[in-house]
Amino acid sequence: MSEKIVQTAGRQQLGEFAPMFAHLNDDVLFGEVWNEAAIDVKTKCIITVVSLMASGITDSSLIYHLQNAKAHGVTKEEIAAIITHATMYVGWPKGWAIFRLAKEVWNEEEEELTDKDRYQNTIFFPIGEPNPYGEFFVGQSYLVPVSKEQIPVFNVTFEPGCRNNWHIHHAKSGGGQMLICVGGRGYYQEWGKEAVEMTPGTVINIPAETKHWHGAASDSWFSHLAIEIPGEEESTEWFEAVLDEEYEKLK
């Protein structure tokens, strides 16, 4: 299943000034048209680049869509052929203009993308740095704060096969945690219950005093927002790692 295209630029830049335009940009153009399943995202990227080229657009919006095309698999050879072909129909000056931008995006000296870089191109939130709580995880994870104001929100990313140990979020009152999957595929499991698969959009509510673990599937990167629910006298107690034989049953 391809990742869901999410856009928030409309609301961020024009939400107060032009809320209807922001809605049409974020919810209709990107929320519906870009996620319509009849055409794959790579093809949509190519169509968009050619459409902007034909319109003479050479500003940051074209650069964004060239970068988006590259992120969704359009190679340097393919973009060169696409621009050359379109130039025959839309005009020589437009071809020269877009080639200057495309050369910067498909820089030949650019280092080959790592698995982490490729995964980062599929999700909205940054992956961040190695998790400082890594001693309580099996495998490599990453942590980055999304917001530290009002309610703390962190994006936690797990490499394939990575998961945290069983643990409990204690609180005298309130407390607990909410998880929202924002990329890849993973699992959440409470003690004594079956594991729940998490994919983008899955929301998990974890009451305080509930023993549980969460992490990536063995064949997929996985990211979730971790939202700390306010409570009194909060603490986290870590326990044993998830047994390999139990984890390996999850497919």
Image (spheres, grey):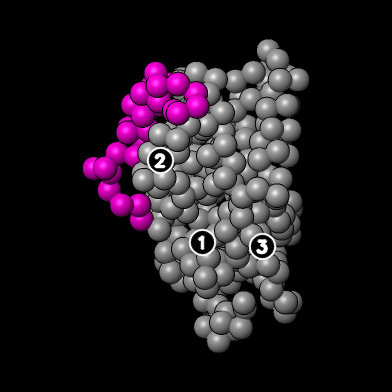
Residue most toward the top? 17
Relative side of 60 to 197, left or right: left
Q: How many marks?
A: 3
For residue 194, which quarter of the picture? bottom right
Residue most toward the front? 88
Asked whether 25 falls inside the magenta stretch, the response is: no
Q: CA distance from mark 2 to mark 3?
A: 39 Å
Which of the image's four quarters has the N terminus? bottom right
Q: Give the mark, 1 or 3, whose residue is nearer the N terminus.
A: 3
Q: Position of residue 185 (x, y in %)?
A: 60, 63
Q: Amino acid at mark 2?
A: Ala
Q: Nearer the viewer, mark 2 or mark 3?
A: 2
Q: Amino acid at mark 1?
A: Trp
User: What residue is rendered at 50% in x and 27% in y?
Assistant: 89
* Callout 3 secondary element: strand
Q: Position of residue 28 (x, y in %)?
A: 73, 33
Relative side of 214 to 157, left or right: right
Q: Position of residue 85 (x, y in %)?
A: 45, 35
Q: Give the residue number, with chain letter if any, for mark 3.
A: 198
Q: Amino acid at mark 3?
A: Met
Of 144 and 16, which appears nearest the observer?
A: 16
Q: CA distance from mark 2 to mark 1?
A: 33 Å
Mark 2 vs 3: CB contact within 8 A: no
Q: Give the mark, 2 or 1, whose residue is nearer the N terminus.
A: 2
Q: Nearer the viewer, mark 2 or mark 1?
A: 2
User: What residue is rendered at 24% in x and 42% in y?
Assistant: 109
User: What residue is rendered at 44% in x and 28% in y?
Assistant: 87
Magenta-tinted stretch: 87-114
Q: Position of residue 131 (x, y in %)?
A: 43, 56
* Tag of residue 221: 1
For disc 2, the neighbor class at 10 Å (few under 14, some 14 to 19, many from 20) is: few
Q: Give the residue number, with chain letter if any, for mark 2.
A: 81
